[in-house]
């Protein structure tokens, strides 16, 4: 598998700015059952547990649960690599998902 590369935004002097543009976030409500996002159009996502905690999985057809998924506490965020077209499954709360570099 080839290594994933991220583009770092730079200013006019080629100094990294530390800012990565994000797509408009999509809200995924997994409070009752595992719910999938729409397909990701990129190679990295930001996941924010807006009403959590949540459990999440990323893949081509993921299903998350309290025993199958990565934990994210309420109001925490995480940046994760993914493949173009992947989905993010959320369970246990509500999450905002945005694609990096959009």
Image (tube, rainbow, N blue to C red):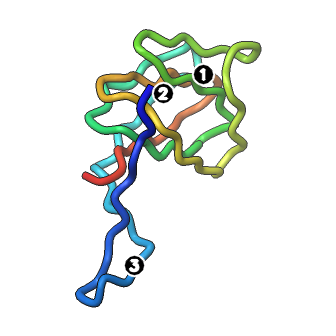
Question: Given this view, does label 2 or label 3 mark the residue nearer the observer?
Answer: 3
Q: Residues within 10 Å of mark 1 (few under 14, many from 20)?
A: many
| For the residues bearing labels 3 and 1, Cβ distance under 8 angstroms | no
Structural distance between the alpha carbons of marks 2 and 3: 33 Å
Residue 102 location (% of width, % of height)? 25, 52
Nearest the viewer among 46 and 54 is 46
Q: Determine the residue positioned at 50% across, 21% down.
A: 89
Residue under numbered circle 2: 29
Residue at the location (54% across, 14% down)? 34
| Image coordinates for residue 82, horizontal then vertical, percent | 44, 32
Q: Is residue 63 left or right of residue 1?
A: right
Circle nearer the N terminus (3, 1): 3
Identify the mark nearer the N-term, 2 or 3: 3
Tell me which residue sits at (45%, 38%) in the image. 3
Q: Quadrant of the N terminus?
A: top left
Say which residue appears at 73% left-offset and 17% top-offset: 66
- What residue sits right under mark 3 in the picture? 17
Q: In what element is the residue under mark 3?
A: loop
Element class at badge 1: strand
Residue 97 left/right relative to 49:
left
The nearer-to-camera label among 1 and 2 is 1
> Mark 3 and mark 2 in contact (Cβ < 8 Å)?
no
Q: What residue is disc 1 on?
A: 91
Are there few (<14), some (14-19), or many (20+) residues within 10 Å of tag 2? many
Cα separation between marks 3 and 1 = 34 Å
| Left or right of residue 44, residue 54 in this image | right
């Amino acid at each position: 598998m080839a290594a994933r590369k991220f583009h770092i935004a730079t200013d006019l002097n080629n100094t990294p700015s530390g800012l990565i543009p994000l797509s408009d976030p999509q809200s995924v409500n997994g409070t009752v059952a595992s719910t999938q996002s729409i397909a990701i159009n990129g190679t990295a996502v930001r996941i924010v547990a807006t009403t959590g905690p949540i459990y999440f999985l990323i893949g081509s057809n993921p299903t998350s649960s309290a025993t199958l998924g990565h934990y994210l506490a309420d109001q925490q965020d995480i940046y994760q690599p993914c493949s173009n077209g992947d989905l993010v499954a959320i369970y246990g709360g509500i999450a905002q998902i945005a694609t990096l570099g959009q």
